[in-house]
Amino acid sequence: MTRSTVLAVLIVALFVATQVQAQTKDPPIPPEKSLKLSEIIARIEQRGQFRYVSEVEWNREGYYDVIYYTTDKAKVEIKIDVVSGEPRL
């Protein structure tokens, strides 16, 4: 085998190994005792001057990062605890 063939085989083997490892990790999901995301969003929608939700992202530390905008076009970034549904300080 030539050097380039050996290098190509090693690169493919490394790629396959990292893909297998990535698939075996547990997905980041909220705990069973948490509120439903729809309940959390409904609470945010009831805030004064709410306009729309832009982003929602789960954080493994136990909260959702929520970005929403108000009627006066202000961007609001808030961390919501998934168990209590309250903002984190």
Image (cartoon, rainbow, N blue to C red):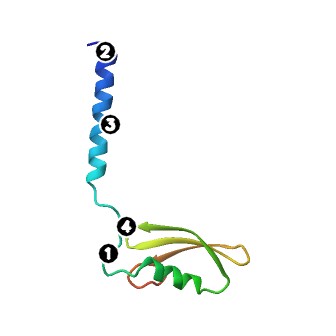
Give amino acid for label 4. Answer: Arg
List the residue tagged with mark 1. Answer: 31
Q: Nearer the viewer, residue 41 or 65?
A: 41
| Contact flag, marks 2 and 1 (Cβ < 8 Å) | no
Cα separation between marks 4 and 2: 43 Å
Give amino acid for label 3. Answer: Phe
- Asked if residue 45 lies left or right of residue 36, the reply is right
Image point (68%, 83%), residue name? 49
Local packing at callout 1 (Cα closer than 10 Å; few below 14, some 14-19, many 20+) is: few
Image point (31%, 44%), residue name? 19
- What is the x, y in percent for residue 14? 29, 35
Give amino acid for label 2. Answer: Arg
Q: Earlier in the sequence, mark 4 or mark 3?
A: 3
**Above or below for 25 versus 59:** above
Identify the element where label 3 is drawn. Answer: helix
Of all residues, the one furthest to the front in this rendering is 38
Image point (37%, 70%), residue name? 61
Of all residues, the one furthest to the right in this rendering is 72
**Above or below for 80 versus 47:** above
Identify the element where label 4 is drawn. Answer: loop
**Above or below for 18 versus 83:** above
Q: Earlier in the sequence, mark 2 or mark 3?
A: 2
Q: Tell me the tag on residue 72.
A: none
Q: Tell me the tag on residue 60.
A: 4
- What is the x, y in percent for residue 43? 52, 85
Cα separation between marks 2 and 3: 18 Å
Residue 88 appearing in the image: no
Cα separation between marks 2 and 1: 50 Å
Identify the element where label 2 is drawn. Answer: helix
